[in-house]
Image: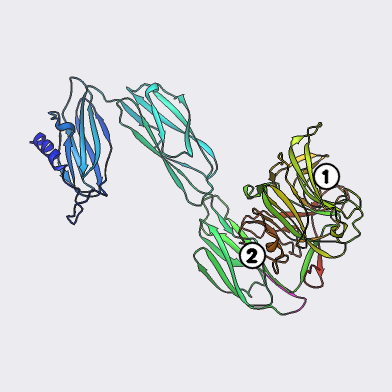
Amino acid sequence: MKKILLFAAAMLALAGCKDPNGATSSASDDITVAPENRTVGGDGGNVQVIVTSTGDWTLASKDGKAYDWVTSDKASGVDGDIVKFVVEPNMEEQKTAEFVFSCGKATAPFTIISMPGEVPTITVTSGAEVKGTYEAGRFTVAVALKNVAESELEVECSEEWVRKLIVLEGDTQNTVNVDFGYDALSELESRTAEITFKGGAANPVKVTFTQSPKPTIEPESASYSLDPATAGTLEIPVRANVEYDITYGEGSDWLTGHKKEGNVEKWNYTAFTQEGQQRTATIIFTEKNPAEGAEAIVATVSVRQSNLRYAINLANARIASPAEWPNAEVMKVGKVFTVEMLARHNGSLNTLGYLFGIERRFLIRHGDTYPKNAWELVCARTSKESNGENREWKLQVTNSASYLPADKWFHVAVAFDGTKAVIYLNGEVVAEGALPSDFKDVDFTESYTGNGATQCLYFGWGYGNGRDWKGNIAEARIWNRTLTQDEIKADGHYYSVPVDSEGLIAYWKMDEGDGSTIYDATSNANHFTAQNMPNGYSWSAGATWVELDGPITVE
């Protein structure tokens, strides 16, 4: 009777796939079965198959072939049904039965193999679930093989970030250890990969590998400076995958009405009108339930509302880039970018001084030629000098009316569009030139040893001591696009821009007023460190902050 049902079902498969409401449609027909094949030993047995379909389904043997050694308990059904196949004992030879599940025009094959004697098996002896941390790493799966040769073993990984490395002999006969490697996880959510072991006539077995993310609490910025003239709302987007508590440092009660909308924490604040004064707040984010044995994650945000204005003094000092960049990739800008900042020199510019850059890679400096207030842009080329150093390409400001002024604030910008560079002083073009064909892509994270010192990205220093910028720097920014002259000269642009401006990848306001950390106001959080040399021969963290009489003004 079962054989008749399977044969008759082949005719039913020609009908359209019906949804539960009785409508017939072939446009969205779909059907899958799990497993797709099974091997049964000589003793016979039962095989269960779960059907997933978009509507009613039918079951038939392939090509209408009849089998007298296997039967099913269903010839049709609905989504989610489980079909049981009964396989008779087999002491003769290997047999194969092929079936087709149909839903309208969609089909899913299913195969049963009956083996005389013992069934080849693959068994995972180390556990069907493996867990890994967010860091790149390796793990091993122990597998036992029965009537399956090691050469027949196949391993498939469902995701590219997990891969088989090597198969080694196991500790006992007919076992192997399969080593896998996996990539680091930078996202906030965990991810899962399925690893399938199969070979010969053995039924496939699966291992699930789950990689957990790094517990994270990341406010968009570590420092906020609020306009003292007006009341407003402080908004701090927080990237987090753990629950956290919020506490406050002393004197933070002027931030009120805290609420959360999505991933944004919000506080209200009033105007602050006390001349010559400032108020500060500290917001502390602390992980609620750290893993056993782990310390709670803590992130701190400082907030300032000030009628004081500060600038950093770089005479006999410098600002150093991080040894390990929190977000290095954004700083690899190639040939299309803009660098800009406000600066003021305290003296007569009668010595060589570096404003910004990496020695022999990218520099804005003055005083390498006469007169000493003449300035230039220096970049690297890929071609080499006889000593192995990169050749240099220079763009010099040759008009004496555009040399750097002393004792007054000015704005400088250099903009690259992939083919040329333009130098601006207070929004006016003072030099421009085509890039050489061997121009070396700019990578602000580059670091090397030269002249007995680490040459990396600095404000106010390069090559060696004595080439500092004897003055102040503020509002330093790097963009991954070419700013136009109109953008550079726009009202208020010299003094402030929104931290979420298009293409803004680094923004050091340099108005902290205390401490040695120079905060990057963008979400990239590539903070720098101010350093000085109090003993005359070694650098240490420290800064000299200057209180300004009023707002910075470019004349």
Residue 241 on image: x %, y %: 51, 55
Where is mark 1, residue-wise?
463
Front residue (pair 519, 375): 375
Q: Secondary structure at mark 1?
A: loop
Q: Secondary structure at mark 2?
A: loop
Residue 248 forms part of the magenta stretch: no
Front residue (pair 395, 91): 395
Residue 101 on image: x %, y %: 21, 40
Q: Quadrant of the C terminus?
A: bottom right
State which region is magenta: 274-280
Question: Crowding near pointer 2: few (<14 within 10 Å), some, many (20+)?
Answer: few
Where is mark 2, residue-wise?
498
Which residue type carries mark 1?
A: Tyr
The residue at 53%/52% (across/down) is 215
Q: Name above or below for residue 137 compared with residue 363.
A: above
Residue 176 on image: x %, y %: 42, 26
Residue 279 forms part of the magenta stretch: yes
Q: Nearer the viewer, mark 1 or mark 2?
A: 2
Gap between marks 1 and 2 measured at Cα: 34 Å
Occupied quadrant, residue 389: top right
Question: Crowding near pointer 1: few (<14 within 10 Å), some, many (20+)?
Answer: some
Residue 367 on image: x %, y %: 88, 51
**How many labels sit on residues?**
2
Circles 1 and 2, Cβ within 8 Å, touching? The answer is no
The residue at 56%/61% (across/down) is 238
